[in-house]
Image (cartoon, rainbow, N blue to C red):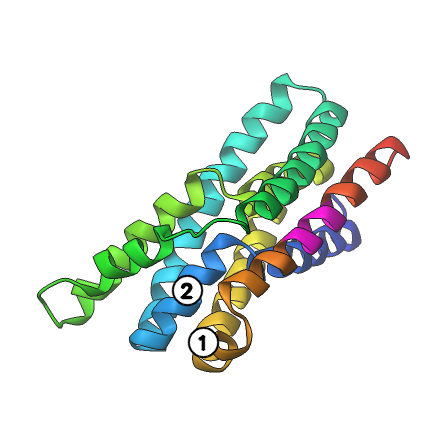
Amino acid sequence: MEAGAALAALLTTAGTLFLAELTDKDALFLLALATKTRAWLVFAAGSVAFTVTSAVIVLLGSVLVAFVPVLAIKLAGGAIMLAYAAWEYSRLSREDRSMEEREEKVLGGGGRGYWSIFIPALLSLIALDLAGDATELLTVVLVARFQDALVVFAGAVVGLVAATGVETALGNRLGKVLSPRRIRYLSIVVFTAIGATVIVTSLLGY
């Protein structure tokens, strides 16, 4: 990939995943942790977790691209993102306590040391991210679109770490404005827009 194309791909990947991550379920978890413990510690855990998960997903995406037609991956990814938005909408009608349970596991340990918070937060974020996370699906779509694993990995790390920085640095303030319900509404809008854009651009050959 030429330098100009690589830069465009990196910026597109970083910007898209930054926007998606701000409204994904990880955002709820990071915001909640940042309001209850040291923000820099949560940022460190998030940065390491997203670097690890991005490497795993980009690798899997590269393998998938080698065996499945690129157009099929893009269309399937767009359709799944639309389905994800619909699923999020259906969840608004019932209470979801999974994030509260994760917070208790991370913050409820007996120790007060940094590692007693960092390690559980890191493991929780990795598990949360790899267990059907919408941004990971979007990463696979971007691998299929640009077909350059290194560029997509770099863009994913930049975008996700930047989003983690925003969520943790502004945790207390954002937590007062963006309730879990409001974040889910934003998530519905963002993933509907991204899913529709992926499908349309794929059909048009972009």
Span colored in magenta:
188-194
Q: Residue at x 36, y 53 (%)?
A: 97
Q: Residues within 10 Å of mark 1 (few under 14, many from 20)?
A: many
Which type of secondary structure does the marked residue at label 2 adopt? helix
Q: Is residue 183 above or below residue 191?
A: below
From the viewer's side, name the closer residue of 10 and 114: 114
Name the quarter where the C terminus is drawn: top right
On the image, the x and y values in percent for residue 29 come to 40, 60
From the viewer's side, name the closer residue of 199 and 162: 199
On the question of residue 147 being in view, the answer is no
On the image, the x and y values in percent for residue 28 come to 46, 61
Q: Residue at x 8, y 65 (%)?
A: 110
Q: Which mark is residue 171?
A: 1
Q: Quadrant of residue 42?
A: bottom left
Is mark 2 in CB contact (under 8 Å) with mark 1? yes
Number of marks: 2
From the viewer's side, name the closer residue of 91 and 146: 91
> Which residue is situated farthest in the right direction here?
204
Q: Which mark is residue 30?
A: 2
> Is 193 covered by the magenta stretch?
yes
How far apart marks 2 and 1 lie (CA) works out to 8 Å
On the image, the x and y values in percent for residue 72 come to 73, 23
**Magenta span dominant secondary structure:** helix
On the question of residue 65 being in view, the answer is yes
Q: Is residue 95 above or below residue 57?
A: below
Horizontally, residue 168 falls left or right of residue 194, namely: left
The mark that comes first in sequence, 2 or 1, is: 2
Q: Amino acid at mark 2?
A: Leu
Q: Which mark is residue 23?
A: none
From the viewer's side, name the closer residue of 88 and 72: 88
> Which residue is situated farthest in the bottom direction here?
173
> Is 57 covered by the magenta stretch?
no
